Amino acid sequence: MLIDEQLPIDKNHLLKQDRTLSFSGMTWDDYEKFNAVEYLGYRTSFLDGVITIMSPSQNHERIKDFIFLLVITYCDAFDLDYYPTGSTTFKDKNKQVGKEPDTSFCFNNLKKIPDLAIEVVYSSGGPDDLRKYQKLGVKEVWFWINNTLEIYVLANNVYQQQQFSFNLPKIENKILTKYIVQVLNGNPRILKKSFLNEIK
């Protein structure tokens, strides 16, 4: 059953608003058989019998890609090996959970579950998605929400909001927020260069 729908009605909404659909009363088999062609471009998640799909707006993607660039810039600056895993579908049938982050990374070596998942929140998701990541065992999750970068680190199977990243320990959320908040109206190349100068 469709329980939520938010669809853009003009080109301006396509830039600024994500499109979300949620279906309740679904099974794991429904999730596995989901028609990826019909909902091409959507990111899909599953928890508690609810399949949620989200089609990101252009602004959503611009912010996500810039955060990706900041992570790469940090890793290059401090010689940290990184393995981008993008919006790969991570799932666990036994735990009845599946999630596609906006982007994600493994550090030092490639793993089945990423060390860092990143979510840009416009009209869906948010810290409630932490339940999905907790079940998957993702050590750290970043949310860009309400023009702020929030960092959550898993400890004793519970997420705690932190000022500093666990995986990228020389950086804090305030510095990330300072640069991300400018990207929709600024030049990503110049912002990335300024970010590098500040963290070094």
Image (cartoon, rainbow, N blue to C red):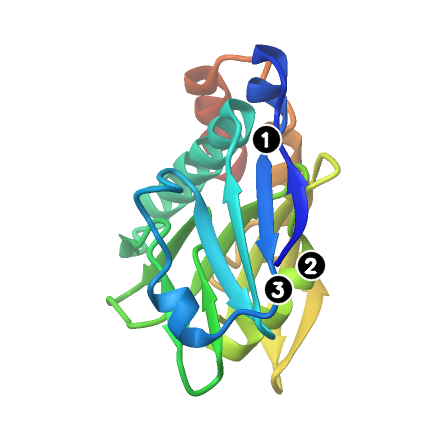
List x then y, in percent, for residue 161: 71, 64
Q: What residue is shown with label 3?
A: 24
Kindly check if marks 1 and 3 are in contact, taking CB atoms under 8 A apart as contact. Answer: no
List x then y, in percent, for residue 141: 55, 60
Q: What residue is shown with label 1?
A: 180
List x then y, in percent, for residue 150: 67, 51
Report how far apart the C-alphas of labels 1 and 3 lie in the structure. 34 Å
The residue mark sitting in front, 1 or 3, is 3
Q: What residue is shown with label 2?
A: 127
The residue mark sitting in front, 2 or 3, is 3
In-front residue for pair 5/198: 5
Query: In the rendered structure, which disc, 1 or 3, sits on the residue that comes first in sequence?
Result: 3
In-front residue for pair 161/25: 25
Question: Please, is residue 63 above or below residue 34 in the view?
Answer: above
Q: Tell me: 138 left or right of 130.
A: left
Amino acid type at mark 1: Ile
Q: Is residue 74 visible?
A: yes
Image point 35% across, 39% down: which residue?
Answer: 40
Question: Please, is residue 126 above or below residue 63 in the view?
Answer: below
Report how far apart the C-alphas of labels 1 and 2 lie in the structure. 19 Å
Q: Is residue 114 visible?
A: no
Query: In the rendered structure, which disc, 2 or 3, sits on the residue that comes first in sequence?
Result: 3
Q: Tell me: 168 left or right of 161.
A: left
Amino acid type at mark 2: Pro
Q: Quadrant of residue 184?
A: top right
